[in-house]
Every structure is written in C-alpha cells, then in structure tokens.
Amino acid sequence: MKAENPSSRLPAVIVFLLVITLPLADRILNLDPGASRGGKQKMERPEKRPADSFTSFFKSQERIFSECLFLRGPMIHINNSMRYRIFGISAVPNVIVGRQGWLFQARENEAPGTARYFPSIGLFSSEELDRWRASIYERRRWLGARGIGYLFIPVPDKSSIYPEYLPENLHGFYRQSRLDQLIEFLKKNSDLPVLDLRPALLAAKRTLRVYAKTDSHWNEWGARVVAGEIHEYLSAPMAKGGRVAHPAPGVRTGRTRPGGNLAMMLTLENSFFREERVKVLPGMSFRALRAELPPLRLAPTVTVEATRNESAPFANAVMFHDSFGRRLKPYLSELFARIVYVRDWGFHFAGQVIEKERPAIVLDEIAEHFLYNLEFVNDLPKKNGI
C-alpha cells in the first residue's frame, strides 16, 4: 500500500487555518464593511437564563455562528463587488444596476418568465381599478361627512421619472405602468382629488436631479418640488387670507457621501456608489416645532409624528405616508398650523387619529411600487351611521 504524501494535505490545512482565524482577523483589522458606517454593532448575546426550548437555544447559536464565525458581511461584500466590477450586474434581486451609476428598485413579479418587477408587467384589471376607485371614494365620503377634505397623492417611482437610465434590456418593457393606468382611470371616471406629481418632477429634472442616483427616493430638491405642488394645490381652497408665497429656495451640490439605500443593499455604498449630495437652501427659516402626539394606542408597526406652526398658512392636517414622506416633512410642517404624520406599512386608514385630530384635510400619499401588491384597507369607525 502506497504511503500518503503529507504535503498533499497542505492546501486543505491552509484553508482550514484561514477559516478558523478569520474571526480574529476581523476583530483586529475590522474587515466588515459595515464598520465604516459608525462602527460595527455589538453582537447581542443570548441572556443567561434557562432556554425556553432546545429549538430556541440552537437557533440562537446558529445566528452567532453564521454572523461571527464565517464573516457573512465581508463575504457578501466581496461577492457583490466582483459581480459589479467584472460583469456590471447586481448580486441582489431587489436592485437593478442602470446606466451611468444609477440604481433602481426592483420587485418580485408573479408573471412567469419575467426578470423581476417592471411597471408595464401585470397591469390592473378593470375589476382592480374599480376596487381602487371604490376604496378611495369610501375614504373621501367618510371624511366629507365630517367636513374634512381629502387629497390622494400617488408618488412615481424613480424608473417613471428617469427611464433613460434603466438598462437597455428593460426599455422594451417600459410602455405603461400601473401608476399611469390608475391616474388616467381616476381622472376619466371619477371626480376624486388626485395630485399628479409627474409633470412637475419631469420639468424639474431638466434643471437638477430630483431623485438620488443610488437611492429609491427623491432627494431634497425633489421633495421641495413636491411640497411646492401640494402648496399650490391647496392654496385656493384652504389658505388663510390667500396664497402665501415662500422665498425661492437655493440649490447647491456638495461633497460626495456614501450611497443611498440601494447602494447599501449591495454593500457598495462606500466604494462604487458614492453620490454627490443635492442640498436645498430653503431661503427661509423653518419655524415648525415638535408637537404632542394624539393620545391613542396604535399598532407597533405604526409611527406617528406631529408638528405645530402658528405662522403657517393652512389649518390642521393629517398625513398618511410611506418612506417618501420623510423628506417632505420639513416643508409640509411649514404649511400647516398642526400636522400629524402617520406612517403605516399596512396603509390602513386610521380613522381614530382623524376623529381625534379633526383636521381640515387628510393627505394620502402612496409610492408607485406599492400599487403592485396592495389594496387600501378602510377600517373606518362609524358614528351615527356615517
């Protein structure tokens, strides 16, 4: 029998030693790219108490094993970097790599044979359009019975405003989106108040970017443009003493900074997808102050903020919103004497907040990509049969 050569085992031994020493190297050299964003977060160890079950114990150990021992973060970062550097593609299904450093948000699509979300695939059926109209009508009817105004604000995705930066293979799909379809349907078949933001954003982008290149949301300038559209829309019926003109804002581009949420999904926000910031100089001092929240107990997934502003041109408001509302808040808070912001990922219509606040108007904002798998939920409390 031929004796095995010990040197043949050397590569395997080297690989084994590298694997077991990676955690130590990570602690010393800080290999995790997440550390560049404020330092590595401390691992939460399980509390020293009797385990509820063997299953929970082993699950906690598995989490520590996968996150600590095998340096999952750095390995993902290396994989994503190589795929982008070599092939120019995204390693993350929910991110599309576009042209000239632009990133776009993707969604899973139910249609077989399609490569992830794209707006023209899976348009609304006539029944679905009718349900959307009926749901929005129900919200307006309920508010109107209480003397409260309503404004529906669908927000276009970045791909609707900047289709020219999408990859070449997706251009053929981009003909009509659900947002196009819904707005056209509501305008032709209802008298519902719908604020179409597309014309203003398309016009503003000729001057300066209105969406971030590496984030799924609009930038400060885009938010300012949208706030101006809301201001203009509401001025005639709601302003106290007529329209109040705000000073024209200044805009400047500044230093580059780490990329936005899409770049973070790729873990490449500090390398390939840093972005120059678009900063709005408002031309005025912000006067809104934080205000007390309505005394209500809402679901844990719902977040509520409130501001007050005695010099605001409009009366009180409630705004239901998603993540696009974040950059709008500084500007909208200057428009309303009091405004309560309700962020609910389930897009319920929190009637108890409205009844407590008794606002002059409710703003109902929803991003385009939520039109693909969502219907409004009208859980409205009834009072005296209304």
Image (spheres, grey):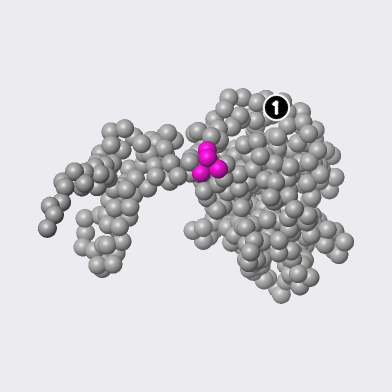
Based on the picture, tell me whether residue 187 belongs to the magenta stretch. no
Q: Which residue is drawn at 85% across and 45% down?
A: 236
Along the viewing direction, whichever of 319 and 115 lies nearer the viewer: 115
Looking at the rendering, in which quadrant would you find the N terminus?
bottom left
Q: What stretch is highlighted in magenta?
A: 83-87
Whether residue 296 sits left or right of residue 313 in the image: it is: left
- Most distant residue in the front direction: 1
- How many numbered markers are drawn? 1
Q: Which residue is drawn at 54% across and 30% down?
A: 257
| Residue 336 seen in the current view | no
Instruction: Give the residue pinned by disc 1.
Output: 251
Circle 1 residues within 10 Å: few <14, some 14–19, many ≥20 = some
Could you say where residue 125 lies in the image, as x and y percent from the top left? 76, 69
Residue 239 lies, with reference to residue 251, above or below; the image says: below
Could you say where residue 308 lies in the image, as x and y percent from the top left? 63, 41
Could you say where residue 367 lies in the image, as x and y percent from the top left? 67, 53
Q: In which quarter of the image is residue 165?
A: top right
Residue 117 lies, with reference to residue 271, above or below; the image says: below
- Most distant residue in the right direction: 188
Q: What element carries label 1?
A: strand
